[in-house]
Amino acid sequence: MASVTLAQVAERAGVSTATVSMVLRNRGRISDATRQRVMKALDESGYVYNQTAANLRNRTSNQVGLLLHDITNPFYGEMTAGLSQEMERHDLLLFLANSEESVERQQKFVDSLMRNNACGMVLCAAKETPSLFFETLKRRNIPAIMVVRPMDDADFDFVGTDNFLGAQLATQHLLRLGHRHIAFIGGSENSASRAQRIGGYSSKLLEHRIQPDSSWVVPSLASQGDSARVAGALFKRYPEITAAVCYQDVVALGVMQTLRKMDRVAGKDFALVGFDDITEASLVQPALTTVSVTAKEIGRQAGELLLSRIQRYDGPPKHIILPPKLVVRESCGFK
Amino acid sequence: MASVTLAQVAERAGVSTATVSMVLRNRGRISDATRQRVMKALDESGYVYNQTAANLRNRTSNQVGLLLHDITNPFYGEMTAGLSQEMERHDLLLFLANSEESVERQQKFVDSLMRNNACGMVLCAAKETPSLFFETLKRRNIPAIMVVRPMDDADFDFVGTDNFLGAQLATQHLLRLGHRHIAFIGGSENSASRAQRIGGYSSKLLEHRIQPDSSWVVPSLASQGDSARVAGALFKRYPEITAAVCYQDVVALGVMQTLRKMDRVAGKDFALVGFDDITEASLVQPALTTVSVTAKEIGRQAGELLLSRIQRYDGPPKHIILPPKLVVRESCGFK
DNA sequence: TTGTATGCGTTATCAT
DNA sequence: ATGATAACGCATACAA
């Protein structure tokens, strides 16, 4: 690839490299005549700007990283789309990596970002991330925004959703419909998001003078199969349960399978609320009532915040908590 | 960010930059003694390799681009995961962009890749991409692998699925179950994938001495609503139809709605096959029999092929067509 | 308004 | 086995 350089363009235009550089970046005062000449030479030569050289010279870059643990999950797909839009608006390139919950892959990615001189990153850290990871990340002092998964470490910027409020909305909805025997299904036991959602759920129950029953709060993997299994066992043991708040839509879908198998119908014999509002939620029969957390907006806001940090905004850590909203469909019946 | 440079490490170790560089890259013959000294200095100084400088010097990079039109779609999420894995194995960084079918955004991304000196790219081009795009891309002569969407231009490497075979499998399945009146529903009229699937469908019919009827081949939008509408009209006009091959699972779900409304039951009064094996396929009642195309594998293979091109493999364009397979569930009844 | 010269941090060639 | 030094392509301080 015999790439054309600034110097070659300069020669062709009969000017210096400085002049060409200034024309390219609209800097300094260049006479119209020479600007025209340079533009023409630029055009004719098929010049391609070498961002790598510029980055080296300027000790900056136009590249940011996004670390996810599961790009396959539609929720993170949406978030990525939002972030990607925002990055594109500001001519930043987005590096993507998928940790699949591997702490090693995560570390490897961040190291790679550092070597490649990325100017910032958005992270949804793997579950078992050691605190050392965050400590060293802070010391690097490169802008890093945490997303979605609640963090212990308040020193980081964070964008996520209000899990507590979301679960309150869901539980409230079920209570209004007259349900008193409400389970909470799904999520992994050490998840902070889950803890917050359980908080919303139980606080609402208590507000209505209902005693939360810990045996009605059951974890599950983020798969339909496991959720179906878990729900099956729960319903068999406690047939009095008439409604459930699910940790995720995926879980709710699994619960639906179980209900069908038991010849119960969501929306008639049982009320079900999900969380996330993934695409399938509106497609499934009956359509799933769920808490929508606007993944795309999380991505956008994270992008905006990251950008401000890159531009040396130096305020204290920002924690942006987006309000979720209840999307009422059919899975709780009609009032 | 006062970053440590090779020169500083060299000074600390009392050697030249050349030596440090050689130690870093395990090149040349370095005595054990100095290697130790350099390692120590490297460690103590908190040195971070500057890939940007190296890339400039070497006129290469370790960065590849991935262009999708909808990262939100779980199919592409899977594909991305497969590609990402492959890239990571070879220490390549992955730039992601989402065109959302915008030809401008697509062009902008590719230009950006060129400026940033990316060493290759994987593209699922936007629908209305002008042929000029492909022409200029070829002239750039940077490795580019096309994926998923069939291309007219045979000069490009391509990784996708065998739409023809997939539709044959689906049609065959219905024929084996005794159906003779089989429709083909869905897809947009100018889609090449659809043409290939229709090819598989009609060739199988002909093989069984059945005349394909063009009025039983109807397009639809990629939404349940439109598919339901289209299917409704079709079934009303041709009540003798007892089975259908659908262009996508989403279409099949729409058809299911229609059947329900007509008090017909998929799996009993009607046989339905989808395409893609999306998550909902296994959830819906009855569970959808469908043609599964392994998105992740497409990503992996694209990655592998891209890598070989980056390493200057110079054979003719490769077209890798992965075999789909039929996933039999309940929507065609049981034999 | 434009040109000259130097440096960004690395690699590789050529000496020693 | 190791060191000195010239690129890589661009941006900018300073000179003209």
Image: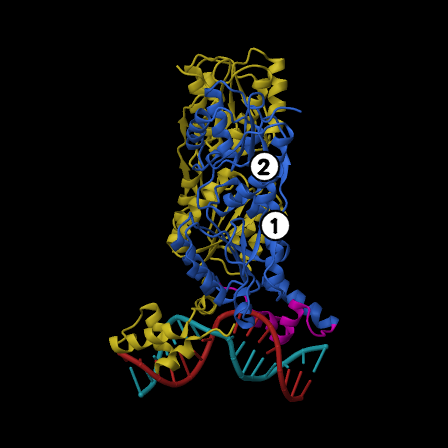
Chain colours: A yellow, B blue, C red, D cyan
Residue holding disc 1: B321
Quadrant hosting residue B242: top right
A134 vs B129, left or right, is: right
Residues under numbered marks 2 and 1 in contact, where contact means CB atoms less than 8 Å apart: no
Q: State whether residue A288 appears in this view.
A: no
Q: Position of residue B117 (x, y in %)?
A: 50, 65
For this orientation, the residue located farthest to the top is A240
Q: Residue B7: say if magenta.
A: yes
Q: Position of residue A142 (x, y in %)?
A: 48, 55
Quadrant hosting residue A237: top right
Q: Position of residue B22 (x, y in %)?
A: 65, 72
Amino acid type at mark 1: Ile
Residue in the picture at 44% in, 24% down: B236
Residue in the picture at 42% in, 72% down: A47
Question: Which of these two is toward me, A6 or A137?
Answer: A6
Q: Quadrant of the C terminus of chain A?
A: top left
Residue in the picture at 40% in, 44% down: A301
Q: Residue B197: say if magenta.
A: no
Amino acid type at mark 2: Leu
B116 vs B210, left or right, is: left
Residue holding disc 2: B205
Q: Which residues are magenta?
A: B2-31
